[in-house]
Image (cartoon, grey):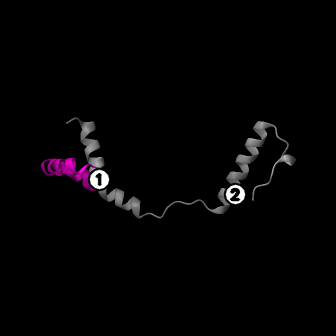
Amino acid sequence: MTEAERDDLIDLYVDDALPEALRGFAETYLAVHPEAAAEAAALLVTAQRLHALPPDKPDDWFVERTLDRLLREHTAAQDIPTNQLFQIR
């Protein structure tokens, strides 16, 4: 098994994305290769911590300013007079 295949196997195992036929192979591989098992365990802990974080959601102020800036940039790029645009709010 190449290092890339080993890394893919560990990643898929940690993500619980392996087909059932390969899951047993991965578990056997990890049982025989303690360094790979330690890496899988560390990745699993990291994945669990990331999934436990609250989802990122920008605040309303940031969204409004970003949309306003994008609209101004888009308008300037197209040379459309601003008095002909609908104001988004």
Amino acid type assigned to the residue bearing label 2 in the image: Glu
Q: Which residue, given by chain and number where applicable, does mark 2 sit on?
A: 64
Question: What's drawn in magenta, residue-wise?
Answer: 18-43
**Residue at the farthest top position:** 2
Amino acid type assigned to the residue bearing label 1 in the image: Val
Q: Position of residue 17 (x, y in %)?
A: 30, 51
Assign a secondary structure to mark 1: helix
Residue 16 lies in what quarter of the image? Answer: bottom left
Label 1 environment density (alpha carbons within 10 Å; few <14, some 14–19, many ≥20): some
Marks 1 and 2 close (CB-CB < 8 Å): no
Q: Position of residue 50 (x, y in %)?
A: 40, 59
Q: Earlier in the sequence, mark 1 or mark 2?
A: 1
Q: Position of residue 87 (x, y in %)?
A: 79, 54
Assign a secondary structure to mark 2: helix
- Residue beneath the point at 81% across and 37% down: 79
Label 2 environment density (alpha carbons within 10 Å; few <14, some 14–19, many ≥20): few
- The quarter of the rendered structure image containing the N terminus is top left
- The quarter of the rendered structure image containing the C terminus is bottom right
- Residue beneath the point at 87% across and 48% down: 83
- Residue beneath the point at 68% across and 61% down: 61
User: Which secondary structure class fits the magenta region best?
Assistant: helix
Residue closer to the observer: 77 or 61: 77
Q: Of the numbered discs in the image, which one, if any, rests on residue 87?
A: none
Residue closer to the observer: 84 or 4: 84
Is 50 left, or right, of 60 in this rendering? left
Is 45 left, or right, of 56 in this rendering? left
| Cα–Cα gap, marks 1 and 2 | 38 Å
Q: Position of residue 20 (x, y in %)?
A: 22, 51
Q: Of the numbered discs in the image, which one, if any, rests on residue 14?
A: 1
- Residue beneath the point at 73% across and 47% down: 71
